[in-house]
Amino acid sequence: MKKNETIRTDIAWSNEDRILVHALDLPTEIIGKFSLGDFAFLELTGRKPNEDESIVFNALAVTLVEHGLTPSVLSTRLTYLGAPESLQGAVAAGLLGLGNTFAGTMEGAARILQVHLNKAPDNIDLDAVALSIVREHQASKRIIPGIGHNLHKNGDPRTPVLFDLAAQHNLSGRYVDLMKRIEMAAEREFGKRLPINATGAIGAIGSELGLPWNIMRGIAVMARSIGLVAHLLEEAKNPMAKLIWDQIEEQATKHMREY
Amino acid sequence: MKKNETIRTDIAWSNEDRILVHALDLPTEIIGKFSLGDFAFLELTGRKPNEDESIVFNALAVTLVEHGLTPSVLSTRLTYLGAPESLQGAVAAGLLGLGNTFAGTMEGAARILQVHLNKAPDNIDLDAVALSIVREHQASKRIIPGIGHNLHKNGDPRTPVLFDLAAQHNLSGRYVDLMKRIEMAAEREFGKRLPINATGAIGAIGSELGLPWNIMRGIAVMARSIGLVAHLLEEAKNPMAKLIWDQIEEQATKHMREY
Amino acid sequence: MKKNETIRTDIAWSNEDRILVHALDLPTEIIGKFSLGDFAFLELTGRKPNEDESIVFNALAVTLVEHGLTPSVLSTRLTYLGAPESLQGAVAAGLLGLGNTFAGTMEGAARILQVHLNKAPDNIDLDAVALSIVREHQASKRIIPGIGHNLHKNGDPRTPVLFDLAAQHNLSGRYVDLMKRIEMAAEREFGKRLPINATGAIGAIGSELGLPWNIMRGIAVMARSIGLVAHLLEEAKNPMAKLIWDQIEEQATKHMREY
Amino acid sequence: MKKNETIRTDIAWSNEDRILVHALDLPTEIIGKFSLGDFAFLELTGRKPNEDESIVFNALAVTLVEHGLTPSVLSTRLTYLGAPESLQGAVAAGLLGLGNTFAGTMEGAARILQVHLNKAPDNIDLDAVALSIVREHQASKRIIPGIGHNLHKNGDPRTPVLFDLAAQHNLSGRYVDLMKRIEMAAEREFGKRLPINATGAIGAIGSELGLPWNIMRGIAVMARSIGLVAHLLEEAKNPMAKLIWDQIEEQATKHMREY
């Protein structure tokens, strides 16, 4: 770890009169002038997105906000049952599940693409790279991040929409190209449908936007926090957590008589 | 707690082929068509914002993303020092500090305004309401949420910008009016400057947007999660957590010899 | 908030050669000489428990470790499904549910007892105090913390065991007495069985031990963290989280066709 | 992931009349009969510890409860400043920092020892194993978990105490032996003092107790939760979080004029 001499941040400061964020005056240059998504792009990259980047970045983030009753949502709702005084705690409980299994595949896909392309020559043979990536995962029996989906077995409906959008906005370059070739190589090698899922598409397009792979799961975290708040609003009106608890406990208690 | 008969959500579902969110098809009707902020509004209210609502809601959310090295940011950075494998854990640690002291004032301000106005007649005397609110807090020695600021003693620079924006977009009605009259009454009663701070302005304008008070701190939670991810990106490149730890421990260790 | 002049703690310090905790040398005076429960008592009170206190305090903590598939446990297991890299995150997700609904009743019971007794004269009429507490809750339609139980309707089997143990070890004084009189008054006023539950017994006995009410839910937090780790060990060997998710999502998806 | 047919746990159940934990009746067979540490051992292993195991397991846990103003403690205190309504949230924020950097070394040490010894023949050459472990880490430039310490450069004072205790109680076998040989090999290869630290000793002795390496950081999580509650008790009486915030922000704000 590089050691700072002094404690400093280049993101934001405030004193009695001013609040500066990325060297812009928050009240006069940001509020009312940036949408939430564009401000998120500024926070992550230090610069305002151009129109193409804005549309595509917002689309990536929007894709990750909501996917129904995921384990994260269940965890958030169950936590709220026990601690209704702390909305922030219930959201935090849900975010804690955005780890290697789910959000991690987005990070993993971006990492593979960036490791292989960031310093690669212009004339690199993408098919050869794709094949070696697939074979390497095959040999070590690891799952290739970003392809295949538990539920959407015939293809994740979000993937083609995201790729089309990226292409329309000139954000479909080598990262997207390599991701697609990985899909093709994997389907040949494994002999089955292994379509690129939404996290694979987002990992690839996020790389086109210049986002480093190690922050990629951060996009899921920020987006999903919106969805978790929405589920809490519904839970407060029409709760399901107690019902979930009762169902699970009833099943488990059947085994009690064995003891 | 009202008991559901069945486990159901009206937010989102997915099956093998489709993902529906608020009855819209995510791939074809949402991705590329909603900005992140507008989608957050849809998640919270069940409907697409009109243009005025979009601008004002995004402005509220943007205001809450970033405020430099807050206790939440410090907690996120210190957590990352110990658990760099879990970006989601470091963000969660920061969000957990968005409780009664900070985000709570936004909720508190909105609650006061909504409790007094949601069922009030058209001709209610707002000055009388404001005065009774101030006196009630005075009598029970509680702080009035949404006015006064530790740092920005001469006025929070975000407040007038937010109120102007709301007025320009026809979202400045009775809630904002009452908030301003509370400020005036409080300054008279306490005999000092007690300007409306950003959380007071957001509580009032959020009420104009129809957001229930009990979800108000959720806007802070979703917005701040963006800022916390940005601080982690910086922490990974240029860490300060170890330096903070060293400084604090050095001060504390001075007292060790007393034992 | 009282402002410290300097950053100091009186709990522990370390330098290159020594680690002191509550002015004891950790290696030579604590390790191997304190059990985990006794050390917890030292941490909370600053002194070593005597034998009676040790047995009773350990009993209180032990009571709170495990209660099967609670919402906290479900949240921990669901979080682990998404983020198996972060055991600490899965435990944290479970602890976040130990709020007002569950652990809060222990705190609430202790608070009532301590508020009414800490400065009370020796000859206070406990039955009158109990009745006024019950009537006050009745009038404001609040639940009396520490009595009644969702599941154990005929009496929580932990309660008499805890009270007997406290009595055997001379830790059954006015707090326990008042708690029992509250139970009796409540049953008379409400005309139904409202037996003291485990959290009520712990709140009362914890008060006998001199623990301040505002730390009472901390005992639940420290104890339950043990149980959550045990459930993760089982989840890693024999997972149920995916099965829970599938069951819930299947029920919710039935409603999708309505859209 | 192996798929359960049904949702079941073998840890605990409750019905209207009974609470069973590891097939023992909680009220009559556990409360008052198990200390907190012994019950934790039961939870993790499914059996009551014998006297030697009890003393040594409690010592390991006790060692991990408290180490002064660590990053975890700072995070807990800073979270409490923002959300005093949620003690559980402040503890959770601190636990989230018990990841790869700190608690991970305990897990890492135990993993190395168990991977190399669990299926090894009786006559395995421990010095050869130790040397190959050291060289492997040297070659891949990874730190050897469990040896060396930032602060206690001349030796962690907890280590010899723990090893002596384990030896006195017949819990010093091949795992401890290999750990010590790794220290010797590492000091020879790197040509400097690299003493076994407390996490290395705990990883080794925990392995002697039969605890699987992947639960080792769970012992830190359960133990540290006790320490974090104690720090919150102190923070409530004599707060330092605001002072920390002020100090850090003051340092950071110096850089503001550069913008």
Image: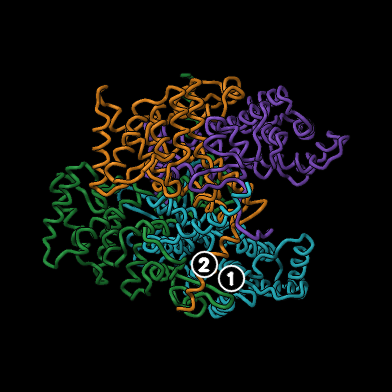
Chain colours: A cyan, B green, C orange, D purple
Across the whole image, how many numbered discs are drawn on residues? 2
Chain name for mark 2: A
Q: Position of residue B6 (x, y in %)?
A: 45, 67
Looking at the image, is A87 positioned above or below residue A198? above
Using the numbered discs, state the Cα–Cα distance from disc 2 to disc 1 in whole angstroms. Answer: 9 Å
State the residue in front, D131 or D174. D174
Question: Residue sitting at 34 percent across and 70 percent down?
Answer: B55
State the residue in front, A208 or C44. C44
C-beta proximity under 8 Å, tags 2 and 1: yes
Looking at the image, is D80 positioned above or below residue A71? above
Binning the other alpha carbons within 10 Å of mark 1 as few (below 14), some (14 to 19) or many (20 upward) gives many
Q: Position of residue C146 (x, y in %)?
A: 38, 41
Question: Residue sitting at 14 percent across and 66 percent down?
Answer: B121
Question: Residue sitting at 74 percent across and 26 percent down?
Answer: D170
What residue did someone put label 2 on? Answer: A64
> Label 2 is placed on what type of residue?
Leu
Q: Position of residue C197 (x, y in %)?
A: 41, 40
Residue C207 in sight from this viewpoint? yes
Q: Earlier in the sequence, mark 2 or mark 1?
A: 2
> Label 1 is placed on what type of residue?
Ala
Binning the other alpha carbons within 10 Å of mark 2 as few (below 14), some (14 to 19) or many (20 upward) gives many
Q: Position of residue A22 (x, y in %)?
A: 44, 57
Query: In the figure, is residue D191 to the left or right of B157?
Result: right
Looking at the image, is A224 positioned above or below residue A148? above
What residue did someone put label 1 on? Answer: A198
